[in-house]
Amino acid sequence: MATTVKLHTGVQMPIVGLGTWKSPPGKVAEAVKAAIAAGYRHIDGAFVYQNETEVGEGVNAMIKEGVVNREDLFIVSKLWCTFHKKSLVRKAFEKTLNDLKLDYLDLYLVHWPVGFKNSEELFPLDCNGEVITDDTHFLETWEGMEELVDAGLTKAIGISNFNKEQIEAILNKPGLKHKPANNQVECHPYLTQEKLINYCHSQGISVTAYSPLGSPDRPWAKPEDPSLLEDPSIKAIAEKHSKTPAQILIRFHIQRNVIVIPKSITPARIQENFQVFDFELSEEEMKTILGFNRNWRVCPMQWGTKHKDYPFHAEF
């Protein structure tokens, strides 16, 4: 069974989970089933991925078959930006819960600190192609999130893509009832996030790394973009341990006590990505990998750079 990271709520969160961003409907239910069969107990999803019904099918099939109980699983989803008004948070959460056909979530995150106009569109754009914002602030959104915990709908709440200043704003919020249990951010050797991770850990906030393999299948990839899985130095470390580059990239996070959610829909890769508990990177190798940092983002969120709460103008 996978090792875990203890949240400040006392709950153990499995350190390796299955990512489902860009997993197409029709494939993702099988991926979830393959992951649970391989030993995964943590599944990461989101409303905006538009595949939660299928994620739920995969989860519920494995529960029905007696492979796992619901209590064995750690299911994560995220509130999308068009539901940041406090009055909309529960409605959005319930849509996710209904799609997943579950009674509760283990962790629910605010997907981005930026609020968009509430609309049918996931990315409501104006005539200049700029995203249309709403007048909310994420502190208002957080109050809606806290109500979900109080109602017993989710065991824990957290954030995603928040910078240090934004996290501080929540922690210093007057009347704060529930502090964030987790901050999910992009993290890999080209974006090591050392300062942000150290800050979060110092505040008792766990960190989850998304796009740990550099998200090679991102729709906006350019031919000249760097490729982590093809990086000769990563390949050399992998050969030394008789492991794949992906396994090295996943192990890198585990040794930093960072939760990691590699995405795959291929059963063999799903299994391979979980076979990361039988070897260890040396201190020297960890240093080498940390040295690859170039502050390069797979997900720079270009459509939101003018938003008042855009998180990536800050150093961390």
Image (tube, helix red, strand yellow):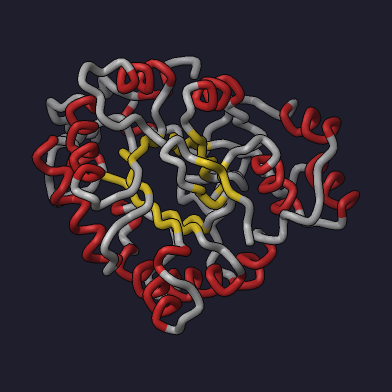
30 vs 108, nearest the viewer: 108
Residue at the extreme front:
10
Q: Position of residue 230 (x, y in %)?
A: 74, 48
Residue positioned 60% across, 30% down in the render: 191
171 relative to 288 in the view: left or right = left
Q: Quadrant of residue 156?
A: top left
16 vs 309, nearest the viewer: 16
26 relative to 194 in the view: left or right = left
Q: Position of residue 13 (x, y in %)?
A: 50, 49
Q: Height in image: 4 above or below 298?
A: below
Q: Position of residue 290 (x, y in %)?
A: 72, 29
Q: Quadrant of residue 312?
A: top left
Q: Position of residue 240 (x, y in %)?
A: 90, 49
Number of numbered discs overlaid on the protein picture: 0
112 vs 226, nearest the viewer: 112
114 relative to 37 in the view: left or right = left
Residue positioned 29% across, 22% down in the render: 309
Q: Quadrant of residue 184?
A: top left
Q: Quadrant of the N terminus?
A: bottom right
Observer able to see residue 21: no
Observer able to see residue 106: yes
Residue at the extreme bottom:
65
Residue at the extreme right:
240
Residue positioned 47% across, 23% down in the render: 203
Residue positioned 87% across, 57% down in the render: 242
